[in-house]
Image: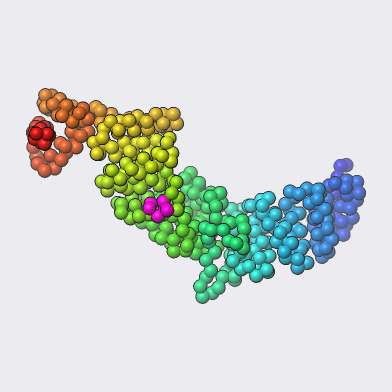
Amino acid sequence: MQCENFNRGLEKAKLHDYTGAIVDFTAELEVNPYFAEAYLQRGLAYYDLGEALRAVSDYTEALKLDSKLIQAYYSRALARMVLKNLPSAIDDIERAIRLDYNYAAAHNLRGTLLRKSGDVHGAIVSFKKAAELYIVQKDAENCRLCMEKIKQLQPKPQPQQVVSIKPSTSASPVIMHEGDYFKQLIEKAEQGDIREALESLNWVFQVDPQDGKAYCIRGVIRCKQERYIDAIADFNQALKYNFQDAIVYRNRGKARLQLGDNTGAIADFNKALELEPDNAMLFIARGNAYRSMGNHYGAVQDYTKALQLDPEDAHAYYNRGLAYTHIEEMQQAINDYQKAASIFCEKEDWKNYQKVLDSLNKITVPSQDLNKPQSTILRQKLLRLVGGYWEIAERLIEDAKYYYPGMSEDWYMEKVISDIERDRR
């Protein structure tokens, strides 16, 4: 039977008969000297017998045959640590992590090696990443052990801040990037698994209650729950614990905007733009804040900047159209609405497509309110005076109703007509 010696060796290793396993792996290698896995397994057996030097030799042979055998790098790092060859052990574990960044045990071992070499900060970063990965694997025990190691390393009076948005000179690769575990939590929230995302975040807070990025992600989730005050509190905590990233300011600005704090929202968007000056979405967000507070000219400028960065952003065209409408630049508004509708149509985004058409029709076709019994002559005259854009007429009528409540519809139209003609004279 093919690989009979190898398979028999595996069975003996499971039964802790490491000497017998070595005999079988050796016999297999005599038949198949290019069998990298056989060298790896014999190395593991040697290690379990306490012969670390022979184990290193076999791991090295395995890697000569298969340079991507990740377990061989991990195992050789472990054996070299036993032999007190820390620099070589760290080099091996770094290679293992480069091959598989989600290898929890490798990050855990890396933490131990860095701690032994005196790099406390790097060790905390590695244990923290290992804990995060163990959370994903639902490995509560190993996660708890990593948490204990972190607590032991953190100074008692002032717990060390271990999260940084900038690369550490002593710890690589950096754990905070958009593809990490936290992005998975955001995706869970977007898919409706908000409770599961929050439960997972609770694990992260147990790992490190001062994790600025965890607060940031919880703030984003709370925004999705429309819990804007709680979200702002989390973003504040993220900044307190030194997670100075544009995503914090961007989302805190959006939460403030939802609560009507336009000035605060603009301040946050300004800070985010300092960090991400080429982010078109930030210009749209700040434009929305300007528009919300009545600064439609400022809004137009921001939407224009967004379109300079992304000429196919339908939302920027639509929002600029809204701003143009308020400053009565109707032809520009129509052009922007038509461009937005075209892009939404190509993307088959029918919900936004219909919203744009509704806005477009509103400034070119009299609204349904005009079906009420009113003077057709007055309506036509007023429509001519506003250049055919009924939304302007509606806004002027609403203003008249505000200052002169309780009058008839015809009276309001006559009042608006009179005011327009007076102003023109």
User: Considering the image in quadrants, where does the N terminus appear?
Assistant: top right
Q: Residue furthest front?
A: 425
Magenta segment includes 72: no
- Residue 274 or residue 231, whichever sits in front: 274
| Residue 32 screen position, x and y as percent | 88, 46
Q: Examine the rendered structure and indicate whether residue 386 appears above or below residue 189.
A: above
Q: Is residue 185 left or right of residue 284?
A: right
| Residue 74 screen position, x and y as percent | 72, 57
| Residue 298 screen position, x and y as percent | 30, 45
- Residue 24 or residue 295, whichever sits in front: 295
Q: Is residue 200 left or right of residue 321?
A: right
Q: How many marks?
A: 0
First to last magenta residue range: 269-274
Q: Is residue 63 left or right of residue 371?
A: right
Which picture quadrant has residue 48? bottom right
Magenta segment includes 271: yes
Q: Examine the rendered structure and indicate whether residue 170 appears above or below residue 31.
A: below
